[in-house]
Amino acid sequence: MKEATDEKIMKAVGGGDLDAFNELVSRYQGHAWKMAYRFLGDSMEAEDVAQESLLKILEAAPRYRATATFRTYFYRILTRLCIDRTRKKRPASIDNIPDVPDPSLGPTEILIENERRGQVRTALDALPPNQKAAMILRHYEGLGYAEIAQVLGVTPKAVERLISRAGASLQARLSHF
Amino acid sequence: MNCKKVISRLQAYVNKEMPVELIREMDEHLGACPACRSQAERIRQVGDVLDSLAVPPLPQGFSARVMAEARKRAPLAKEKKSFFPLARQPLQWLLELSAPMRLAACAMVLLACLLGMFMSKELSLSGNRQTSVAEAESLDGFEWFSPTPPVSLGSVYLTYASVTPAAGENP
């Protein structure tokens, strides 16, 4: 099971194999959590969306067809859930940003670092959902433009425009760093 | 390549999302244009700033919670599947075939339909629609359609009844 491809495991999940689903969870839970957290900026919301994305995969498994890679399929579900959640909820407050202090930093440096993170968070939250999704998928998850295009259901050229606009907007807000 | 074009594609250049020839052209332009070069540098800096956005570790017991919820939902899905095996995905088997096999399956169904139509037409044009029992019995093996097949109890009775009793013999 450990060496099997995601697509093969997904086929087994479709047949009702919960051990196979457990393997998928262990492979993708980190991605689901990080992407949801970066998108939503709130631990509770992020955990809820990450969990829901994995359970949606379980429910959809009997109908799953490997027309794209499983990774693309997974990010498509996760991204949709993140976008839907932002539309329903108000933007995350920067007060929700937890401190993850670097032990090597002093108190002043930690304050500056937190301030910096808060501004990055605000700049990301100011982006329209599609630009934000494209930027997160590219910068943090390391997907190529072609794969992001499949995730968002747009052309690679449109992804380039989305990322370019997001980059310009972030640059305007974070230029003082 | 002019500055306007270079600036419009700078983000893709920094992300290395363009053909090699175009990257070479951009390199040439950036080597000669300080303004575009500093813009590319700013894009890289934004990338570095984005990296500072830390993510807390995955909440403890996350996968256990997911699996517990999965176990709750999985039996329902199985029950539905076994109760309405065909209603859920009536043509699932067809969808799972490769494209050529799917085409072959459709062709076979079409051929079977055409053959059926052709044969029924032959029958309807054959004149007398009701084949008599006698005609049927005259065909090899069709005596089994008779009310008294050869080795049946009825046949034995008829044979016995049709024998004329000898004189002075009580039936």
Image (cartoon, coloured by chain):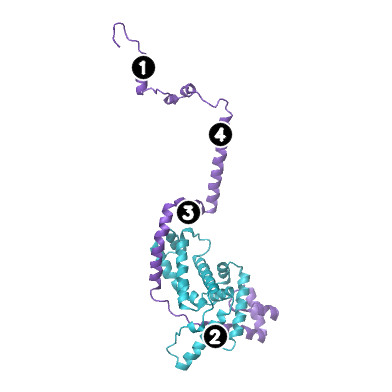
Helix, strand or loop at disc 1? helix
Residue positioned 57% across, 37% down in the render: B117
Labelled pair 4, 2 in contact (Cβ < 8 Å) = no
> Most extreme residue toward the right, as rendered?
B2
Tell me how far mark 4 sits from mark 1, CA to CA: 40 Å
Relative to residue A158, is residue B139 depicted above or below? above
User: Mark number for residue A177?
Assistant: none
Q: Residue type at mark 3?
A: Arg
Residue positioned 66% across, 84% down in the render: B36
Q: Chain letter of disc 4?
A: B
Image-quadrant location for residue A2: bottom left
Labelled pair 2, 3 in contact (Cβ < 8 Å) = no
Determine whether, in the image, residue B46 is placed left or right of residue A59. right
- Quickly name the residue at label 3: B88
Earlier in the chain: of badge 3 and badge 1, it is 3
Tell me how far mark 3 sits from mark 1, CA to CA: 60 Å
Residues at discs 4 and 3 both on one chain: yes
The chain assigned the colour cyan in the figure is A
Q: Chain letter of disc 3?
A: B
Whole-percent x, y for residue A13 in the image: 43, 61
- Quickly name the residue at label 4: B120
Number of marks drawn? 4
Residue positioned 53% across, 47% down in the render: B105
Q: Chain letter of disc 2?
A: A
Foreground tag (4 vs 3)? 3
